[in-house]
Image: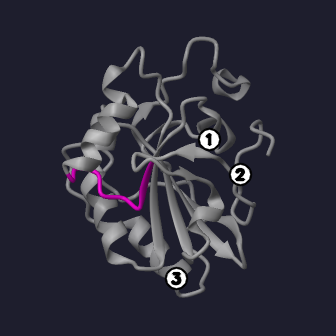
Amino acid sequence: MDSETELAVGDEAPDFELPGTDGETYTLASFADYDALLLVVTCNHCPYAKAKFDELNRLADSYDDLAVVGVNPNDDEAYPEDSFERMEELVADGTVDYTAYLRDEAQTVADDYRAVCTPDPFLLENDDGTFRLAYHGRLDDALDPDAEPERFHMREAVEAVLAGERVPFADEALPSRGCSIKWKPGNEPAWWNA
């Protein structure tokens, strides 16, 4: 995948190999038994990301055929609260209850998926063993941490994908809002400042 090109609906999702808070190593194939995978580039400290913990937990709990996977790429030297140890604590105390919470230490997933903020959600459809982008956009219409959502876009998108249908608003520009990805010094992709 050329990280200069943004993923489009139908594109094959870039693979990865990342450690999880449970001690396991995960790739896309780890989720082959699910019909859909919600990969969310997120973190521990951002107020926008924290405001979506409950909704992501609810999604993980509500759909048996959906895997919800958090991927934290942030520079934990500059932002110590985004450390792997803090990720483990959040999982242990139940704050984060996703299918898996993964650490993107090299920041390659954030680059490959061209994620720009935390949270940045990518809903992937399992197409006979190949995960393809079905929807990239906001979880809901509460774009500020203290706002209450009225429309839950990701729930609608998940239900469409699990029903074998195209996400009706997949081609609309419905970007997520959050804190910027915290790139390590010198690790910002070329497209980041383009």
Q: Residues within 10 Å of mark 3 (few under 14, many from 20)?
A: some
Is 76 in front, or is 170? 76
Which residue matches tag 2? 14
Task: Give the mark nearer the N terminus: 2 vs 3.
Answer: 2
The residue indicated by pointer 3 is: 162
Disc 2 and disc 1 in contact, CB within 8 angstroms: yes
Residue 55: x and y in percent read 29, 60
| Kind of element beneath mark 1 | helix
Q: Which of labels 3 and 1 is toward the front?
A: 1
Q: Residues within 10 Å of mark 1 (few under 14, many from 20)?
A: many
Q: Seen from this angle, which residue lies furthest bottom?
A: 163
| Spatial separation of the CA atoms under disc 3 and disc 1 | 25 Å
Q: Which residues are magenta?
A: 94-101
- Quadrant containing the C terminus in the rendered view: top right
Q: CA distance from mark 2 to mark 3?
A: 21 Å
Residue 168 is at least partly visible in this image: no
Disc assigned to residue 109: 1
Q: Secondary structure at mark 3?
A: helix
Check disc 3 and give the amino acid type. Leu
Magenta part, dominant SS: loop
Q: Position of residue 137 (x, y in %)?
A: 51, 55
Query: Which mark is nearer the camera, 2 or 3?
Result: 2
- The picture quadrant where one finds residue 50 is top left
Q: Position of residue 118 (x, y in %)?
A: 43, 39
Residue at (65, 21) in percent of width and height: 193
